[in-house]
Amino acid sequence: MADTERFLVADDHPMVRDALVSALGQVFVGAQFTMAGTLAQAQAALDRQPDTDAVLLDLDMPGMDGLTGLARLRSEHPTVPIIIVSAAREAGVVQRAYEFGASAYIDKSASLEEIAGIVRAVLDGEIFAPPDAVAGDSFAQRAAQLTPQQWRVLALMVQGDQNKQIAHKLGVGEATVKAHVTVILRKLGVRSRTQAVIEARGLALPGPETLRQ
């Protein structure tokens, strides 16, 4: 993560945007904020600044069409964490938001301190999922969804390697590894890197050298 965090706050209510910027500004001193009131503005902002550290996104603003807008942003910018801040509380909406790639889902009634804390956790690599997001699936079944490259990254995580070391061993950029880790946590249904490693150790995971194509 860069020394100065960059956030995109996308909500069509100026007071909500200002409140979120104020809350995050107290926690992330010196952070840079871009604001958007429509999906088109959010897309343009991310196109201008693709290295944005996180997006705080409202589902109910012009152009979003509910979760369709989330899906579009996720496909256009797959490595940028998207944190939904919404008044919609239906379990189905929350569930689908995670399926479409949200890193966290925050109710607008949450305190600004709670919102800031969740944003910090997301930037630290955590994925927040509803309790029933992976109900009925075993960890092994979820792990089976990983691609070969994601398996290699997970195997190196289990060995204790950090992103920089993994990037060197796999011959890819550190940002690519960070993106892989985010997707791995999401697919495995775990909140943190540590939890993923603990669970993966129970799978008798093969070494990364045996996973090469």
Image (tube, rainbow, N blue to C red):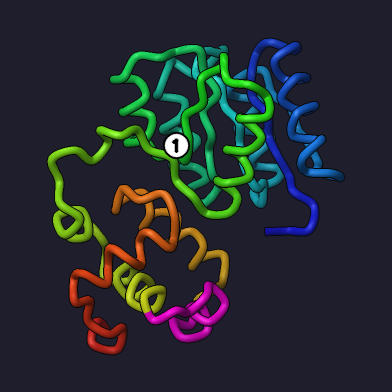
Q: Position of residue 182 (x, y in %)?
A: 45, 55
Q: What is the span of residues highlighted in magenta in the rendered image? A: 159-171
Examine the residues drawn in magenta and state their main secondary structure: helix
**Taking 186 as reference, is 35 left or right?**
right
Q: Position of residue 72 (x, y in %)?
A: 45, 33
**Taking 18 as reference, is 37 left or right?**
left
What residue is pinned by disc 1? Answer: 102
Q: Quadrant of the N terminus?
A: bottom right
Residue at 30% of width from left, 34% of height from top? 131
Residue at 20% of width from left, 53% of height from top? 142
Using the image as rendered, state which of residue 21 and residue 179 is in the foreground. 21
The image quarter containing residue 98 is: top left
Instruction: Judge whether 213 appears above or below 194 on screen.
Output: below
Residue at 61% of width from left, 30% of height from top? 114
Is residue 213 visible in the rendered structure shown here? no
Q: Secondary structure at mark 1?
A: loop
Is residue 132 visible in the rendered structure shown here? yes
Structural crowding at the residue carrying mark 1, measured as other residues with C-alpha within 10 Å and reported as few (<14), some (14–19) or many (≥20): many
**Taking 161 as reference, is 148 left or right?**
left
Using the image as rendered, state which of residue 70 and residue 107 is in the foreground. 107
